[in-house]
Amino acid sequence: MVDKITPISDEPLPADQAFVLSVVATDANTLLATWIIHEEYYLYHDKFFIDIKGAEFDTIVFPKGKIKDDPLFGKVQIHKGRLAVEIPLKNIQTQQITFTARYQGCWLGGICYPPLEEITNIVLPIQSTETTISTKAYQPEVAPYKTTGTENVELNATDKIAALLQQDNVFWVLASFFGFGLLLSLTPCVFPMIPILSGIIVGHKGEVTTRKALIMSIVFVLSMSVAYSIAGVLAGYFGENLQILFQTPWILIVFSLIFVALAFSMFGYYEIQLPASIQGKIAKISNKQEGGHLIGVAIMGFLAALIVGPCVAPPLAGALIYIGQTGDAMLGGLSLFVMSLGMGAPLLAIGAGVSKLPKAGGWMDNVKYIFGILMLAVAIWLLDRIISPLVSLVLWAALFSFSPIAMGALNKLTNTPTPWQRIFKAIGLLVLAYGILLWGLVARGGGDMLAPLSGYGTSGAQVEQVHLKFERIKSNNDLDQVLARANKNNQIVMLDFYADWCISCKELERFVFSNADVVNAMKNAISLQADVTDNDATDKALMARFNIIGPPAILFFKNGVENRSQRIVGEINAQGYLEHLNKVQ
Protein backbone atom coordinates (compact mmCIF):
# COMPACT_ATOMS: atom_id res chain seq x y z
CA MET A 1 0.00 0.00 0.00
CA VAL A 2 1.37 3.41 -1.00
CA ASP A 3 1.37 5.96 1.79
CA LYS A 4 -0.29 9.27 1.27
CA ILE A 5 2.28 12.00 0.87
CA THR A 6 1.79 15.72 1.33
CA PRO A 7 2.74 17.32 -1.99
CA ILE A 8 5.68 19.69 -2.10
CA SER A 9 4.22 21.98 -4.78
CA ASP A 10 1.34 24.37 -4.19
CA GLU A 11 -0.20 23.85 -7.63
CA PRO A 12 -0.29 20.90 -10.05
CA LEU A 13 2.00 20.85 -13.07
CA PRO A 14 0.77 20.83 -16.66
CA ALA A 15 0.13 17.28 -17.81
CA ASP A 16 3.05 17.24 -20.26
CA GLN A 17 5.43 18.09 -17.39
CA ALA A 18 3.91 15.73 -14.84
CA PHE A 19 4.03 12.77 -17.26
CA VAL A 20 6.77 12.85 -19.93
CA LEU A 21 6.37 10.13 -22.57
CA SER A 22 9.05 9.10 -25.05
CA VAL A 23 8.67 6.32 -27.64
CA VAL A 24 11.62 4.95 -29.60
CA ALA A 25 12.36 2.01 -31.86
CA THR A 26 14.98 -0.15 -30.19
CA ASP A 27 15.22 -2.25 -33.35
CA ALA A 28 13.26 -2.87 -36.55
CA ASN A 29 10.60 -4.91 -34.72
CA THR A 30 10.40 -3.40 -31.24
CA LEU A 31 9.25 -0.18 -29.62
CA LEU A 32 10.10 1.06 -26.14
CA ALA A 33 7.63 3.44 -24.49
CA THR A 34 8.93 5.22 -21.39
CA TRP A 35 7.00 7.47 -19.03
CA ILE A 36 8.96 9.75 -16.68
CA ILE A 37 6.52 10.48 -13.85
CA HIS A 38 7.09 13.46 -11.56
CA GLU A 39 7.71 12.51 -7.93
CA GLU A 40 4.37 13.97 -6.77
CA TYR A 41 2.31 12.19 -9.43
CA TYR A 42 1.25 8.70 -10.48
CA LEU A 43 -0.43 6.88 -13.39
CA TYR A 44 -3.22 4.31 -13.10
CA HIS A 45 -2.23 0.82 -14.21
CA ASP A 46 -5.58 0.00 -15.84
CA LYS A 47 -6.00 3.30 -17.73
CA PHE A 48 -3.45 2.65 -20.48
CA PHE A 49 -4.50 2.21 -24.11
CA ILE A 50 -2.03 1.69 -26.96
CA ASP A 51 -2.74 1.82 -30.70
CA ILE A 52 -0.31 1.60 -33.61
CA LYS A 53 -1.04 2.43 -37.25
CA GLY A 54 1.21 0.77 -39.79
CA ALA A 55 1.94 -2.35 -37.74
CA GLU A 56 0.33 -4.89 -35.45
CA PHE A 57 1.42 -5.94 -31.97
CA ASP A 58 0.74 -8.70 -29.50
CA THR A 59 -0.80 -8.17 -26.07
CA ILE A 60 1.33 -5.71 -24.13
CA VAL A 61 2.35 -6.82 -20.66
CA PHE A 62 2.85 -3.86 -18.34
CA PRO A 63 5.08 -4.26 -15.26
CA LYS A 64 3.21 -4.75 -12.02
CA GLY A 65 2.38 -1.52 -10.23
CA LYS A 66 2.16 -0.62 -6.56
CA ILE A 67 -1.10 -0.82 -4.60
CA LYS A 68 -2.72 2.46 -3.57
CA ASP A 69 -5.91 3.01 -1.60
CA ASP A 70 -7.38 5.58 -3.97
CA PRO A 71 -10.25 7.76 -2.67
CA LEU A 72 -12.02 7.51 -6.05
CA PHE A 73 -11.41 3.94 -7.20
CA GLY A 74 -10.50 2.07 -4.01
CA LYS A 75 -7.45 -0.20 -4.09
CA VAL A 76 -5.78 0.19 -7.47
CA GLN A 77 -2.39 -0.38 -9.07
CA ILE A 78 -0.39 2.73 -9.85
CA HIS A 79 2.98 3.56 -11.37
CA LYS A 80 5.41 6.15 -9.99
CA GLY A 81 8.87 7.38 -10.94
CA ARG A 82 9.51 5.64 -14.23
CA LEU A 83 7.54 3.19 -16.32
CA ALA A 84 9.04 1.47 -19.37
CA VAL A 85 7.15 -0.94 -21.62
CA GLU A 86 8.48 -2.94 -24.54
CA ILE A 87 6.16 -3.49 -27.52
CA PRO A 88 7.08 -6.23 -30.04
CA LEU A 89 5.75 -5.48 -33.53
CA LYS A 90 4.53 -7.86 -36.24
CA ASN A 91 3.01 -7.62 -39.72
CA ILE A 92 4.73 -4.28 -40.31
CA GLN A 93 3.22 -2.56 -43.35
CA THR A 94 5.36 0.59 -43.49
CA GLN A 95 8.63 1.86 -42.08
CA GLN A 96 6.92 4.98 -40.70
CA ILE A 97 4.30 4.13 -38.09
CA THR A 98 2.04 6.17 -35.82
CA PHE A 99 1.98 5.40 -32.11
CA THR A 100 -0.98 6.53 -29.99
CA ALA A 101 -1.01 6.26 -26.20
CA ARG A 102 -3.86 7.12 -23.85
CA TYR A 103 -3.36 7.17 -20.09
CA GLN A 104 -4.60 8.88 -16.94
CA GLY A 105 -2.92 10.00 -13.73
CA CYS A 106 -3.30 12.14 -10.63
CA TRP A 107 -1.44 14.61 -8.43
CA LEU A 108 -0.90 13.76 -4.77
CA GLY A 109 -2.52 17.09 -3.94
CA GLY A 110 -5.90 15.57 -4.80
CA ILE A 111 -6.37 16.52 -8.46
CA CYS A 112 -6.76 13.94 -11.24
CA TYR A 113 -6.15 14.78 -14.89
CA PRO A 114 -8.63 13.89 -17.63
CA PRO A 115 -7.50 11.02 -19.90
CA LEU A 116 -4.42 12.12 -21.83
CA GLU A 117 -3.60 11.22 -25.44
CA GLU A 118 -0.24 11.51 -27.16
CA ILE A 119 0.49 10.68 -30.80
CA THR A 120 4.04 10.03 -31.98
CA ASN A 121 5.32 9.33 -35.50
CA ILE A 122 8.19 6.84 -35.53
CA VAL A 123 10.53 5.76 -38.33
CA LEU A 124 11.57 2.15 -37.84
CA PRO A 125 15.23 1.32 -38.57
CA ILE A 126 16.00 -0.92 -41.49
CA GLN A 127 16.33 -4.57 -40.51
CA SER A 128 20.00 -5.54 -40.46
CA THR A 129 21.38 -9.07 -40.51
CA GLU A 130 24.69 -7.82 -39.10
CA THR A 131 23.35 -6.29 -35.93
CA THR A 132 21.56 -8.37 -33.35
CA ILE A 133 20.09 -6.61 -30.35
CA SER A 134 18.57 -8.40 -27.40
CA THR A 135 15.35 -6.78 -26.29
CA LYS A 136 16.46 -7.79 -22.82
CA ALA A 137 18.94 -4.95 -22.98
CA TYR A 138 16.11 -2.46 -22.97
CA GLN A 139 14.24 -3.71 -19.96
CA PRO A 140 12.70 -0.98 -17.83
CA GLU A 141 14.11 0.17 -14.54
CA VAL A 142 10.82 -0.40 -12.72
CA ALA A 143 10.05 -4.11 -12.80
CA PRO A 144 10.63 -7.15 -15.01
CA TYR A 145 8.18 -7.87 -17.79
CA LYS A 146 7.57 -10.52 -20.41
CA THR A 147 9.49 -10.08 -23.60
CA THR A 148 10.99 -11.89 -26.52
CA GLY A 149 14.43 -11.55 -27.97
CA THR A 150 17.57 -13.22 -29.07
CA GLU A 151 19.46 -15.29 -26.54
CA ASN A 152 23.15 -15.61 -25.75
CA VAL A 153 24.09 -12.18 -27.04
CA GLU A 154 27.28 -10.51 -25.87
CA LEU A 155 26.74 -8.35 -22.79
CA ASN A 156 28.52 -5.14 -21.94
CA ALA A 157 30.22 -4.64 -18.56
CA THR A 158 27.13 -3.06 -16.98
CA ASP A 159 24.80 -5.86 -18.06
CA LYS A 160 27.29 -8.50 -16.90
CA ILE A 161 27.28 -6.99 -13.42
CA ALA A 162 23.48 -6.79 -13.42
CA ALA A 163 23.45 -10.48 -14.36
CA LEU A 164 25.92 -11.22 -11.55
CA LEU A 165 23.36 -9.99 -9.03
CA GLN A 166 20.90 -12.59 -10.33
CA GLN A 167 23.10 -15.37 -8.94
CA ASP A 168 22.02 -17.29 -5.87
CA ASN A 169 25.42 -17.10 -4.17
CA VAL A 170 25.02 -13.87 -2.20
CA PHE A 171 28.49 -14.19 -0.64
CA TRP A 172 30.12 -14.27 -4.08
CA VAL A 173 28.05 -11.28 -5.22
CA LEU A 174 29.05 -9.18 -2.20
CA ALA A 175 32.70 -10.24 -2.44
CA SER A 176 32.72 -9.23 -6.10
CA PHE A 177 31.26 -5.82 -5.32
CA PHE A 178 33.84 -5.26 -2.59
CA GLY A 179 36.49 -5.99 -5.20
CA PHE A 180 34.82 -3.56 -7.61
CA GLY A 181 35.01 -0.94 -4.86
CA LEU A 182 38.74 -1.51 -4.35
CA LEU A 183 39.28 -0.95 -8.07
CA LEU A 184 37.14 2.21 -8.02
CA SER A 185 39.23 3.54 -5.12
CA LEU A 186 42.00 4.10 -7.67
CA THR A 187 39.84 6.46 -9.77
CA PRO A 188 39.76 10.30 -9.58
CA CYS A 189 36.32 10.11 -7.97
CA VAL A 190 37.82 8.92 -4.67
CA PHE A 191 41.03 10.97 -4.62
CA PRO A 192 39.38 14.13 -3.18
CA MET A 193 38.21 12.07 -0.19
CA ILE A 194 41.84 11.67 0.93
CA PRO A 195 42.55 15.34 1.83
CA ILE A 196 39.05 15.71 3.28
CA LEU A 197 39.44 12.81 5.72
CA SER A 198 43.09 13.57 6.45
CA GLY A 199 42.29 17.22 7.09
CA ILE A 200 39.52 16.28 9.51
CA ILE A 201 41.91 14.07 11.49
CA VAL A 202 44.79 16.54 11.49
CA GLY A 203 42.48 19.42 12.42
CA HIS A 204 40.99 17.55 15.38
CA LYS A 205 41.61 19.43 18.60
CA GLY A 206 43.71 17.51 21.07
CA GLU A 207 45.76 14.36 20.71
CA VAL A 208 44.61 11.94 18.02
CA THR A 209 45.70 8.40 18.74
CA THR A 210 45.71 5.67 16.12
CA ARG A 211 42.51 4.33 17.67
CA LYS A 212 40.74 7.69 17.41
CA ALA A 213 41.94 8.22 13.85
CA LEU A 214 40.75 4.75 12.88
CA ILE A 215 37.34 5.35 14.48
CA MET A 216 36.96 8.66 12.63
CA SER A 217 37.99 6.97 9.38
CA ILE A 218 35.48 4.15 9.92
CA VAL A 219 32.67 6.64 10.64
CA PHE A 220 33.60 8.64 7.52
CA VAL A 221 33.65 5.55 5.28
CA LEU A 222 30.44 4.10 6.75
CA SER A 223 28.53 7.36 6.27
CA MET A 224 29.94 7.63 2.75
CA SER A 225 28.74 4.08 2.06
CA VAL A 226 25.27 4.82 3.43
CA ALA A 227 25.02 7.85 1.14
CA TYR A 228 26.02 5.83 -1.93
CA SER A 229 23.53 3.10 -1.03
CA ILE A 230 20.60 5.48 -0.47
CA ALA A 231 21.36 7.38 -3.67
CA GLY A 232 21.66 4.11 -5.59
CA VAL A 233 18.41 2.60 -4.33
CA LEU A 234 16.50 5.81 -5.07
CA ALA A 235 18.01 5.97 -8.55
CA GLY A 236 17.11 2.33 -9.19
CA TYR A 237 13.51 2.79 -8.07
CA PHE A 238 12.74 6.21 -9.51
CA GLY A 239 15.38 6.71 -12.19
CA GLU A 240 16.56 9.88 -10.43
CA ASN A 241 20.27 10.03 -9.65
CA LEU A 242 20.50 11.81 -6.29
CA GLN A 243 24.15 12.69 -6.87
CA ILE A 244 23.22 14.57 -10.03
CA LEU A 245 20.70 16.64 -8.06
CA PHE A 246 23.54 17.77 -5.79
CA GLN A 247 25.53 19.20 -8.72
CA THR A 248 23.51 22.42 -8.89
CA PRO A 249 25.69 25.56 -8.81
CA TRP A 250 24.48 26.90 -5.46
CA ILE A 251 25.19 23.59 -3.69
CA LEU A 252 28.67 23.40 -5.20
CA ILE A 253 29.38 27.01 -4.23
CA VAL A 254 28.22 26.49 -0.64
CA PHE A 255 30.27 23.33 -0.26
CA SER A 256 33.31 25.04 -1.79
CA LEU A 257 32.98 27.86 0.74
CA ILE A 258 32.86 25.26 3.51
CA PHE A 259 36.18 23.84 2.34
CA VAL A 260 37.65 27.34 2.13
CA ALA A 261 36.52 27.94 5.72
CA LEU A 262 38.08 24.65 6.79
CA ALA A 263 41.30 25.60 5.00
CA PHE A 264 41.63 28.91 6.84
CA SER A 265 40.91 27.08 10.07
CA MET A 266 43.90 24.87 9.24
CA PHE A 267 45.96 28.01 8.66
CA GLY A 268 45.23 29.02 12.26
CA TYR A 269 43.05 32.07 11.61
CA TYR A 270 40.25 30.68 13.79
CA GLU A 271 38.84 27.48 15.25
CA ILE A 272 35.59 25.95 14.05
CA GLN A 273 33.61 24.56 16.95
CA LEU A 274 30.02 24.24 18.11
CA PRO A 275 28.44 26.82 20.45
CA ALA A 276 29.06 26.15 24.15
CA SER A 277 25.40 25.29 24.78
CA ILE A 278 25.40 22.58 22.11
CA GLN A 279 28.79 21.30 23.27
CA GLY A 280 27.34 20.93 26.76
CA LYS A 281 24.48 18.79 25.50
CA ILE A 282 26.84 16.62 23.51
CA ALA A 283 29.09 16.26 26.56
CA LYS A 284 26.17 14.77 28.46
CA ILE A 285 25.80 12.11 25.77
CA SER A 286 29.50 11.35 25.73
CA ASN A 287 32.04 11.81 28.50
CA LYS A 288 34.28 13.31 25.86
CA GLN A 289 33.38 15.54 22.97
CA GLU A 290 34.47 12.79 20.63
CA GLY A 291 30.84 11.83 20.03
CA GLY A 292 29.98 15.29 18.77
CA HIS A 293 33.05 15.29 16.60
CA LEU A 294 32.08 11.94 15.11
CA ILE A 295 28.69 13.37 14.17
CA GLY A 296 30.49 16.04 12.18
CA VAL A 297 32.71 13.41 10.56
CA ALA A 298 29.63 11.38 9.60
CA ILE A 299 27.90 14.41 8.08
CA MET A 300 31.02 15.29 6.11
CA GLY A 301 31.37 11.73 4.80
CA PHE A 302 27.70 11.60 3.78
CA LEU A 303 27.79 14.93 1.94
CA ALA A 304 31.18 14.25 0.37
CA ALA A 305 29.83 11.08 -1.23
CA LEU A 306 26.92 12.97 -2.78
CA ILE A 307 28.66 16.18 -3.79
CA VAL A 308 32.36 15.51 -4.21
CA GLY A 309 32.30 12.21 -6.07
CA PRO A 310 29.36 11.85 -8.50
CA CYS A 311 30.86 9.10 -10.65
CA VAL A 312 29.13 6.46 -12.73
CA ALA A 313 30.93 3.16 -13.27
CA PRO A 314 29.77 -0.26 -14.53
CA PRO A 315 29.31 -1.75 -11.01
CA LEU A 316 27.08 1.16 -9.96
CA ALA A 317 25.11 1.14 -13.21
CA GLY A 318 24.70 -2.64 -13.08
CA ALA A 319 23.38 -2.53 -9.52
CA LEU A 320 20.87 0.18 -10.43
CA ILE A 321 19.62 -1.79 -13.43
CA TYR A 322 19.16 -4.81 -11.16
CA ILE A 323 17.22 -2.77 -8.58
CA GLY A 324 15.04 -1.25 -11.28
CA GLN A 325 14.25 -4.56 -12.93
CA THR A 326 13.64 -6.71 -9.86
CA GLY A 327 12.70 -4.20 -7.17
CA ASP A 328 15.17 -6.03 -4.88
CA ALA A 329 16.45 -3.00 -2.98
CA MET A 330 17.85 -5.24 -0.25
CA LEU A 331 20.47 -7.04 -2.34
CA GLY A 332 21.03 -4.10 -4.68
CA GLY A 333 21.47 -1.63 -1.84
CA LEU A 334 23.65 -4.05 0.15
CA SER A 335 25.86 -4.56 -2.91
CA LEU A 336 26.29 -0.80 -3.29
CA PHE A 337 27.07 -0.52 0.43
CA VAL A 338 29.76 -3.22 0.22
CA MET A 339 31.14 -1.64 -2.96
CA SER A 340 31.41 1.68 -1.11
CA LEU A 341 33.25 -0.04 1.73
CA GLY A 342 35.74 -1.29 -0.84
CA MET A 343 36.12 2.23 -2.19
CA GLY A 344 36.75 3.50 1.34
CA ALA A 345 39.10 0.72 2.48
CA PRO A 346 42.26 2.63 1.47
CA LEU A 347 40.93 5.64 3.37
CA LEU A 348 41.05 3.61 6.59
CA ALA A 349 44.75 2.96 6.15
CA ILE A 350 45.45 6.57 5.19
CA GLY A 351 43.44 7.90 8.14
CA ALA A 352 45.25 5.65 10.60
CA GLY A 353 48.59 6.62 9.05
CA VAL A 354 47.92 10.35 9.47
CA SER A 355 47.67 9.82 13.23
CA LYS A 356 51.31 8.70 13.27
CA LEU A 357 52.50 12.20 12.38
CA PRO A 358 54.19 13.96 15.32
CA LYS A 359 51.88 16.39 17.07
CA ALA A 360 54.23 18.84 18.71
CA GLY A 361 56.28 21.70 17.31
CA GLY A 362 56.46 23.56 14.02
CA TRP A 363 56.34 20.28 12.08
CA MET A 364 52.67 19.83 12.89
CA ASP A 365 51.89 23.42 11.94
CA ASN A 366 53.40 22.77 8.51
CA VAL A 367 51.34 19.59 8.18
CA LYS A 368 48.18 21.57 8.95
CA TYR A 369 49.16 24.18 6.37
CA ILE A 370 49.60 21.45 3.75
CA PHE A 371 46.19 19.99 4.46
CA GLY A 372 44.72 23.49 4.41
CA ILE A 373 46.14 23.92 0.91
CA LEU A 374 44.63 20.57 -0.07
CA MET A 375 41.25 21.79 1.25
CA LEU A 376 41.55 24.82 -1.04
CA ALA A 377 42.36 22.44 -3.90
CA VAL A 378 39.15 20.51 -3.21
CA ALA A 379 37.20 23.80 -3.22
CA ILE A 380 38.64 24.75 -6.62
CA TRP A 381 38.04 21.23 -7.89
CA LEU A 382 34.33 21.57 -7.01
CA LEU A 383 34.03 25.02 -8.59
CA ASP A 384 35.78 23.71 -11.70
CA ARG A 385 32.46 22.08 -12.67
CA ILE A 386 30.57 25.36 -12.95
CA ILE A 387 33.13 28.05 -13.84
CA SER A 388 34.86 28.76 -17.14
CA PRO A 389 38.11 26.91 -17.93
CA LEU A 390 40.10 30.16 -17.87
CA VAL A 391 38.81 31.21 -14.43
CA SER A 392 39.54 27.71 -13.17
CA LEU A 393 43.07 27.95 -14.57
CA VAL A 394 43.59 31.29 -12.77
CA LEU A 395 42.55 29.72 -9.45
CA TRP A 396 44.88 26.73 -9.92
CA ALA A 397 47.75 29.00 -10.95
CA ALA A 398 47.22 31.13 -7.84
CA LEU A 399 47.13 28.06 -5.60
CA PHE A 400 50.28 26.48 -7.04
CA SER A 401 52.28 29.73 -7.08
CA PHE A 402 51.24 31.44 -3.84
CA SER A 403 51.08 28.32 -1.63
CA PRO A 404 54.81 27.41 -1.81
CA ILE A 405 55.71 31.06 -1.19
CA ALA A 406 53.49 31.12 1.90
CA MET A 407 55.09 27.85 3.04
CA GLY A 408 58.55 29.46 2.85
CA ALA A 409 59.88 27.95 -0.37
CA LEU A 410 61.78 31.18 -1.10
CA ASN A 411 63.12 31.57 2.43
CA LYS A 412 66.83 31.02 3.00
CA LEU A 413 67.77 27.72 4.62
CA THR A 414 69.58 27.66 7.94
CA ASN A 415 73.35 27.23 8.03
CA THR A 416 72.90 23.55 8.93
CA PRO A 417 69.74 22.40 7.11
CA THR A 418 68.50 18.87 7.59
CA PRO A 419 67.95 16.58 4.59
CA TRP A 420 64.17 16.89 5.07
CA GLN A 421 64.41 20.70 4.95
CA ARG A 422 66.31 20.47 1.67
CA ILE A 423 63.73 18.05 0.25
CA PHE A 424 60.76 20.21 1.27
CA LYS A 425 62.40 23.32 -0.19
CA ALA A 426 63.06 21.50 -3.47
CA ILE A 427 59.44 20.32 -3.61
CA GLY A 428 58.23 23.86 -2.88
CA LEU A 429 60.36 25.30 -5.69
CA LEU A 430 59.06 22.68 -8.14
CA VAL A 431 55.46 23.48 -7.19
CA LEU A 432 56.19 27.20 -7.60
CA ALA A 433 57.72 26.56 -11.04
CA TYR A 434 54.60 24.66 -12.05
CA GLY A 435 52.44 27.54 -10.82
CA ILE A 436 54.46 29.96 -12.97
CA LEU A 437 53.90 27.71 -16.00
CA LEU A 438 50.17 27.80 -15.29
CA TRP A 439 50.28 31.60 -15.30
CA GLY A 440 51.85 31.26 -18.74
CA LEU A 441 48.81 29.27 -19.85
CA VAL A 442 46.56 31.99 -18.42
CA ALA A 443 48.44 34.59 -20.47
CA ARG A 444 47.87 32.48 -23.60
CA GLY A 445 44.14 32.27 -22.89
CA GLY A 446 44.06 28.68 -21.66
CA GLY A 447 45.63 25.28 -22.16
CA ASP A 448 46.19 21.84 -20.72
CA MET A 449 47.23 21.87 -17.05
CA LEU A 450 48.84 18.45 -17.45
CA ALA A 451 50.95 19.69 -20.35
CA PRO A 452 51.70 23.34 -19.54
CA LEU A 453 54.69 23.45 -21.92
CA SER A 454 52.68 22.32 -24.95
CA GLY A 455 52.78 24.92 -27.68
CA TYR A 456 56.16 26.34 -26.69
CA GLY A 457 59.14 26.00 -29.01
CA THR A 458 59.65 26.18 -32.75
CA SER A 459 58.07 22.89 -33.87
CA GLY A 460 54.51 24.17 -33.92
CA ALA A 461 53.28 21.36 -36.15
CA GLN A 462 54.35 18.75 -33.63
CA VAL A 463 52.40 20.28 -30.78
CA GLU A 464 49.21 20.97 -32.71
CA GLN A 465 46.29 19.78 -30.61
CA VAL A 466 43.64 17.48 -32.06
CA HIS A 467 40.18 16.82 -30.72
CA LEU A 468 37.13 14.94 -31.85
CA LYS A 469 34.56 17.30 -33.36
CA PHE A 470 31.17 16.68 -31.79
CA GLU A 471 27.74 17.43 -33.13
CA ARG A 472 25.67 18.54 -30.14
CA ILE A 473 22.20 17.13 -29.54
CA LYS A 474 19.66 17.75 -26.80
CA SER A 475 16.53 15.65 -27.30
CA ASN A 476 15.33 12.29 -28.56
CA ASN A 477 14.11 14.00 -31.73
CA ASP A 478 17.59 15.39 -32.37
CA LEU A 479 19.05 11.91 -32.02
CA ASP A 480 16.44 10.30 -34.27
CA GLN A 481 17.16 12.81 -37.03
CA VAL A 482 20.89 12.07 -36.88
CA LEU A 483 20.31 8.30 -36.80
CA ALA A 484 18.09 8.56 -39.88
CA ARG A 485 20.79 10.56 -41.70
CA ALA A 486 23.51 8.12 -40.63
CA ASN A 487 21.40 5.14 -41.66
CA LYS A 488 20.93 6.66 -45.10
CA ASN A 489 24.67 7.28 -45.49
CA ASN A 490 25.66 3.95 -43.90
CA GLN A 491 27.60 5.67 -41.10
CA ILE A 492 28.32 4.60 -37.54
CA VAL A 493 27.11 6.97 -34.82
CA MET A 494 28.80 7.48 -31.46
CA LEU A 495 26.80 9.21 -28.71
CA ASP A 496 28.66 10.58 -25.69
CA PHE A 497 26.69 11.59 -22.58
CA TYR A 498 28.57 14.48 -20.95
CA ALA A 499 28.12 16.91 -18.03
CA ASP A 500 30.29 19.77 -16.77
CA TRP A 501 30.31 18.35 -13.24
CA CYS A 502 31.33 14.85 -14.39
CA ILE A 503 34.97 14.15 -13.50
CA SER A 504 35.25 11.08 -15.68
CA CYS A 505 33.81 13.04 -18.63
CA LYS A 506 36.73 15.46 -18.35
CA GLU A 507 39.13 12.50 -18.32
CA LEU A 508 37.56 11.18 -21.53
CA GLU A 509 37.84 14.62 -23.14
CA ARG A 510 41.51 14.88 -22.20
CA PHE A 511 42.80 11.38 -22.88
CA VAL A 512 40.40 9.73 -25.35
CA PHE A 513 38.69 12.33 -27.53
CA SER A 514 41.99 14.23 -27.88
CA ASN A 515 43.89 11.12 -28.95
CA ALA A 516 45.10 11.29 -32.57
CA ASP A 517 44.34 7.60 -33.23
CA VAL A 518 40.79 7.99 -31.93
CA VAL A 519 40.20 11.14 -33.99
CA ASN A 520 41.51 9.39 -37.10
CA ALA A 521 39.39 6.26 -36.49
CA MET A 522 36.24 8.38 -36.10
CA LYS A 523 36.70 10.47 -39.26
CA ASN A 524 34.03 8.55 -41.20
CA ALA A 525 31.63 8.24 -38.25
CA ILE A 526 29.26 10.77 -36.70
CA SER A 527 30.29 11.90 -33.22
CA LEU A 528 27.40 13.12 -31.09
CA GLN A 529 27.52 14.62 -27.62
CA ALA A 530 24.54 15.11 -25.32
CA ASP A 531 25.28 17.66 -22.62
CA VAL A 532 23.07 16.67 -19.66
CA THR A 533 24.54 19.21 -17.25
CA ASP A 534 21.14 20.87 -16.68
CA ASN A 535 19.46 17.50 -15.95
CA ASP A 536 16.14 18.92 -17.16
CA ALA A 537 13.14 16.97 -18.44
CA THR A 538 14.60 16.71 -21.96
CA ASP A 539 17.91 15.38 -20.62
CA LYS A 540 16.11 12.87 -18.41
CA ALA A 541 13.97 11.64 -21.31
CA LEU A 542 17.06 11.10 -23.46
CA MET A 543 18.86 9.20 -20.69
CA ALA A 544 15.71 7.21 -19.88
CA ARG A 545 15.53 6.03 -23.48
CA PHE A 546 18.73 4.05 -22.95
CA ASN A 547 18.46 3.44 -19.19
CA ILE A 548 21.41 5.77 -18.55
CA ILE A 549 21.66 6.76 -14.87
CA GLY A 550 24.22 9.49 -15.48
CA PRO A 551 27.35 10.38 -17.42
CA PRO A 552 29.75 9.27 -18.65
CA ALA A 553 28.26 6.79 -21.09
CA ILE A 554 29.26 6.14 -24.70
CA LEU A 555 26.85 4.42 -27.09
CA PHE A 556 27.51 3.13 -30.61
CA PHE A 557 24.86 2.85 -33.33
CA LYS A 558 24.94 0.98 -36.61
CA ASN A 559 22.03 0.93 -39.06
CA GLY A 560 20.09 3.11 -36.63
CA VAL A 561 20.31 0.55 -33.80
CA GLU A 562 22.55 0.66 -30.73
CA ASN A 563 25.15 -2.08 -30.40
CA ARG A 564 24.39 -2.58 -26.72
CA SER A 565 27.23 -5.03 -26.14
CA GLN A 566 29.78 -2.30 -26.93
CA ARG A 567 28.27 0.34 -24.64
CA ILE A 568 30.89 2.04 -22.45
CA VAL A 569 29.93 3.19 -18.95
CA GLY A 570 32.50 5.06 -16.88
CA GLU A 571 36.11 5.72 -17.80
CA ILE A 572 38.13 4.01 -20.52
CA ASN A 573 41.47 4.67 -22.18
CA ALA A 574 42.04 5.38 -25.86
CA GLN A 575 43.06 1.80 -26.68
CA GLY A 576 39.97 0.39 -25.02
CA TYR A 577 37.77 2.84 -26.91
CA LEU A 578 39.31 1.78 -30.23
CA GLU A 579 38.67 -1.88 -29.42
CA HIS A 580 34.98 -1.14 -28.85
CA LEU A 581 34.83 0.89 -32.07
CA ASN A 582 36.43 -1.90 -34.12
CA LYS A 583 33.85 -4.39 -32.86
CA VAL A 584 31.03 -2.06 -33.91
CA GLN A 585 32.47 -1.58 -37.40
Image (cartoon, grey):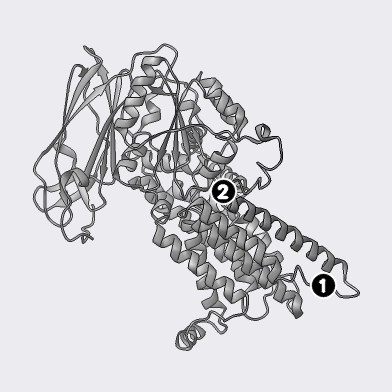
Could you say whether the residue bearing mark 2 is in a helix, strand or loop?
loop
Could you say whether the residue bearing mark 1 is in a helix, strand or loop?
loop
Specify whether 359 is left or right of 557.
right
Which residue does the numbered mark 1 point to in the structure image?
A: 412
Instruction: Give, as a three-letter code, the residue at label 2.
Output: Gly
Which residue does the numbered mark 2 point to in the structure image?
A: 446
Is 512 rendered above or below residue 239?
above
Specify whether 98 is left or right of 441.
left
Neighbourhood count class around disc 2 (C-alpha, 10 Å): few under 14, some 14–19, many 20 upward: some
Is 187 rendered above or below residue 21?
below
Is 469 rendered above or below residue 381?
above
Residue 190 visible? The answer is: yes
**In the foreground, 240 or 502:** 502
Residue found 47% across the figure and 65% down from its top:
255
Can you give x and y, in whole percent of width and height, for residue 139 in the image?
36, 32
Residue 543, located in which quarter of the rendered image?
top left
Can you give x and y, in whole percent of width and height, for residue 114 in the image?
8, 43
Which of the two discs, 1 and 2, labels the residue nearer the N terminus? 1
**In the foreground, 96 or 58:** 96
